[in-house]
Amino acid sequence: MKLTYTLPFRPDISKFLYRSGLRKVLALFLLTCLIQFNSGCSKTDNDRSIKVEIWHNGGPLDCNTFNKHQQAWSIQQLAFFISHVELSGEGAEYQTTLSATPWQTDDVVLIKPHMPECSAQLNNAKDAKGKVESEIKGETQSTAKSKVKGAVSQNETPPYDDAATQALKTNSYLQFAVPVDLDSLEQLSFTLAVPFELNHQNPLSQPSPLNLPSMFWSWRSGHKFFRLDMQGPDKNWVFHLGSVGCTAASIMRSPQSECVQPNRVSFDLDKKYDGTKLVMHLDRLITDIPMQNDSSCLFNSGQESCAVLMSNFKTQAVFEWH
Amino acid sequence: MALNISITQSIQVYICFILSCVLIACTPVVSVQNAYDWKLPKGFPHPIVPLDNPMSDAKVVLGKKLFFDVDLSFNQSISCASCHQPEFAFSEPQKIAVGATGQKHRRNTQSLVNVAYNSNLTWAHSGLNRIEQQILIPMFSENPIELGITGHEDEVLQRFEKQGYATLFKTAFDSSEVTFEQIVKALASYVRSLTSFTSAFDEYAYQNNDAAMSDAAKRGMELFFSEKFECFHCHGGFNFTQSSQHQSQKLDLRPFHNTGLYNIDGKGAYPVYDQGLIEVTLQPRDMGKFRAPTLRNVEVSAPYMHDGSLATLEDVIEFYAAGGRAQGSTNPLKSSFLTGFELRVEQKQDLVTFLQSLTDRQFLNLNLNGPLVSP
């Protein structure tokens, strides 16, 4: 293979080829490659992304459990789509393009924040007892497993489970294809939804994240724009937001026109601080929701809580740009 | 000048090396395997295949022979296919599996349909996601004993040094030496090749043929995907299980659910002999959680649930309509999508008809004629 012509200079006549020059060339290449490597694989740059944080009662929720109505609720799933992200400031408007990652297409991003299990202090004595019992049980399991020869016992963590796969578990960032100057910006606008033209397509031919079954109802109804599944001590509470009243020949066919209730909520947020964070206030979202099983909202007709939740999005400042 | 050329060449080599390092560093662990023809219908994505075991026809052929060969069990009594029977979509019509020594397994044999797309394997293990790892369990496990190879390794390996296998190993691995690593890789390749996407439902949904499904099946489909019946929340996506990944969908999911089969102590406990995901994660919330299996070919893979405790599809639908079984329906850890629903007789029939539309006769017939090898 002739590589000479693919180089941006002609090495055989370059002055760099003198003895010390060779080192320069190599050092330069190494440096360039390192920079390339870092920018290619690193997660975010400050001015290329906005971090999404989930807050509760005025502060970040750093694990998945919080109290409401004197009960501990743990978040089983929290994920939502954001699209049509626009930034504006000083009279100018910036059309933003999102970089292509498994979590983003150029216009739609799926946010699924990291929600680690809360540590033992939140568990009561009963839970602690259960844990001890399960540990004993788990020990017999692992003993059994260690007898299995080969990779299973030696390699309990599978080789897939490296940093790359970790990055596929959660996403807390809006990542822009080109850097933005957050300092000069004043307003952030977005829609909490998947646009109609992307919402009802065959998921097999859609790019990630528009092909994730857990966020997809069907071709007719499209995606769940917002999904919050929570577990209380003796009950569950669920909120799935998406378009309803969609007309198509069947559940596996796409509607030709917009649904009766598209349920796309738009937000125009003023910048409060330096603009590096988009905060979602979970407690504000569930204001005035009694958190009983029958107050779940899945948009399957006549659920009162849906109206309250939709109104909360608008009136309770659920999203803030910090 | 000669010196210049050699320096130029060394620079080229060096640059290539650096660039390839950069490229390798950014490449995910797995990548597309172009050489193998998956023979998938239009529009279906390729599964994710580990880089160290790319698919090949030769490995699939060898794996298939091994899969049906009782020589793989220590006492030459059973093969993989003894439990994973092709006519039952690679499961078996028994509540629980029985190993080479007659020892009973605690769980129902799972179907192997589209197992290449599974992001997690077995009934309840969040860390087991490579078929190559999973296969070691039936081969070497001592409790329960399945194929029972442990303690008989040399004896079992020697059986495959006979004529017939030597050529297959040579073609598949470029070496006629028989090792367990090669056996595992070949078995994994064969099992990965078992893809099923030519059911009546697929014809209707993905190939746009409106006439492919009966009206009853279409009515059942509407119920299946409704927010009232909630079936699709766990059995969603193209493979009817959320535990699926493919070349353009690699995001991680947690596809385990407590379905309210049991509630021994009123606090959610499952029977001590099998408590599901909690045994692996040690998280109390994972009590009774099991992986939602694919529903493709579910018509032929009875009985159902991790312990085979529901005999028919009608039983399963009634179980979900009741929101669980007996005390299990009040299990506090039960999935929020299993609150139960009112079910009319004709709706139940429509749902069953829909589930039957997921049967892929072509797949079942194609794999029937496995080469059965007797001892």
Image: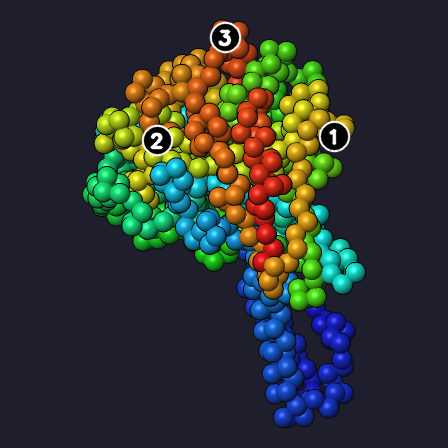
> Around disc 2, counting alpha carbons within 10 Å, would you say few (fewer than 14), some (14 to 19), or many (20 or more)?
some
Q: Position of residue A47 (x, y in %)?
A: 64, 65
The residue most toward the top is B345
Q: Residue at x 46, y 25 (%)?
A: A294
Which of the labelled discs sits on residue B344, or is there none?
A: 3
Q: Which residue is drawn at 66% across and 64% down?
A: A182
The residue mark sitting in front, 3 or 2, is 2
In 3D space, how far apart are the residues under numbered discs 2 and 1 (Cα atoms)? 39 Å
The residue mark sitting in front, 1 or 3, is 1
Q: Where is residue B322 in the image (x, y as percent from the top left)?
A: 40, 16
In the rendered image, which residue does mark 2 sit on?
A234
In 3D space, how far apart are the residues under numbered discs 1 and 3 (Cα atoms)? 32 Å
The reply, left or right, for residue A134 in relation to residue B239 is left
Q: Is residue A265 visible?
A: yes
* Quarter of the view holding residue A9: bottom right
Q: What residue type is labelled 1?
A: Glu
Labels 1, 3: one chain: no
Q: Which amino acid does label 2 sit on?
A: Asp
In the rendered image, which residue does mark 1 sit on?
A258
Colour convention? rainbow
Earlier sequence position, callout 2 versus callout 1: 2
